[in-house]
Image: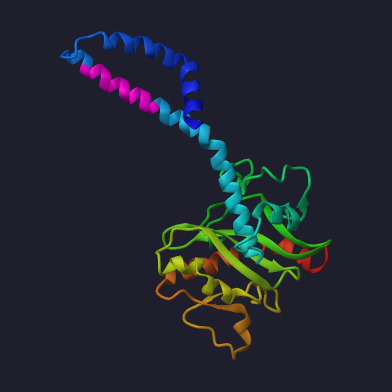
Amino acid sequence: MFNEKIQAKLESCEKYQKFAVYRDKILALSNDSLEKTIAIALSLCFVCAILVSMAAVALKPLQHENKAFDMKKNILDVAGLLNADTDVSAEFAQLIEAKLVDMETGNYVEDKDVENYDQRKAAKDPAQSVDIPVKKDIASIKRKAKISKIYLVKDGDKIKSIILPVHGYGLWSTMYGFLAVNADGQTVQSINFYDQAETPGLGGEVVNPVWRALWKDKKIYSESGDVALGLIKGNVDTSKADAVYKVDGLAGATLTSAGVTNLIKYWMSNEGFAPYLAKVRTGG
């Protein structure tokens, strides 16, 4: 079926029709002709280029669909709602509500298309983003979108948890992930990095379920309101009072660990989601 569609598009292409005429002229030449050899090689390159470009266009909708499906899976995963038999689309539609948040005020934005908003694209658009001053850019991301897309995990009419997009630079890459926070705006439920290129077995352990489980029930803000959550070198001493703000560092991955700490401190600060989470904690 796919080949038939490609063939139909080729036959309707004006450039291909002109090429067909040229091809017939080439085939009429002698097989020993240097001109024919060169022409056939060039023609083959031309046809392959057309096929590749048309295949890319034909597959683009499927690529977008797969990307959206994968994002839904990651959101359900960090929300603790993904199982082997989960109907991802149905579960997402029933339990997850996407919202847009103004990063400066912490208020919801109601006059934009939530479904089609792409925060990563917006961060590259000068009209939809702002430069981050070097002194404040501890996550090394340079620009941030003015509006962020967050996800509310619903339990009937109540909000069970909030999923916040976070990203920052590690050792080799910008790590993109989600931080799931309970409805109190203070307690971590989970973390998940869905796009990163850190060293496998070292910094790449940010996707290890065992390490991710260490984040559950950790607190973001200290009693004074500062961002206290972060990774430490080695293992957390659970007997200490501040253990609730600390997560085990990644063994052999000092820079990746620092990167995770920095992106948490940035996105949970007033530069990030602090204004929004403050409203959540006060019922605003």
Q: Which residues are magenta?
A: 37-49
Residue 102 in sight:
no
Instruction: Mark yes or no: residue 189 visible.
Output: yes
Q: Position of residue 224 (x, y in %)?
A: 70, 77
- Coloration of the structure image: rainbow
Screen quadrant of the C terminus: bottom right
Residue at the spot x=57%, y=52% of the render?
Answer: 70
Q: Quadrant of residue 64?
A: top right
Please identify the residue farthest to the bottom as the structure is shown: 239
Q: Residue at x 43, y 15 (%)?
A: 15
**Residue 117 image position (x, y, % from top left):** 66, 44
Q: Is residue 224 magenta?
A: no
Q: Residue 273's quadrant in the figure? A: bottom right
The foreground one among 63 and 193 is 63
Looking at the image, residue 116 sits to the left or right of residue 247; the answer is right
Q: In the displayed image of the protein, which residue is found farthest to the left?
A: 32
Q: Main secondary structure of the magenta part?
A: helix
Q: Position of residue 140 (x, y in %)?
A: 51, 58
Q: Residue most toward the front?
A: 1
Seen in the image, is 85 located left or right of residue 1? right
Instruction: Tell me what residue is drawn at x 62 percent, y 69 percent.
Output: 190
Q: Is residue 23 left or right of residue 236?
A: left
Q: How many marks?
A: 0
The correct choice, above or below, for 130 with respect to 7 in the image is below
**Left or right: where does residue 108 sit relative to residue 242?**
right
Q: Nearer the viewer, residue 227 or 207?
A: 207
- As for residue 42 lying within the magenta part, the answer is yes
Instruction: Name above or below for residue 89 compared with residue 156.
Output: above
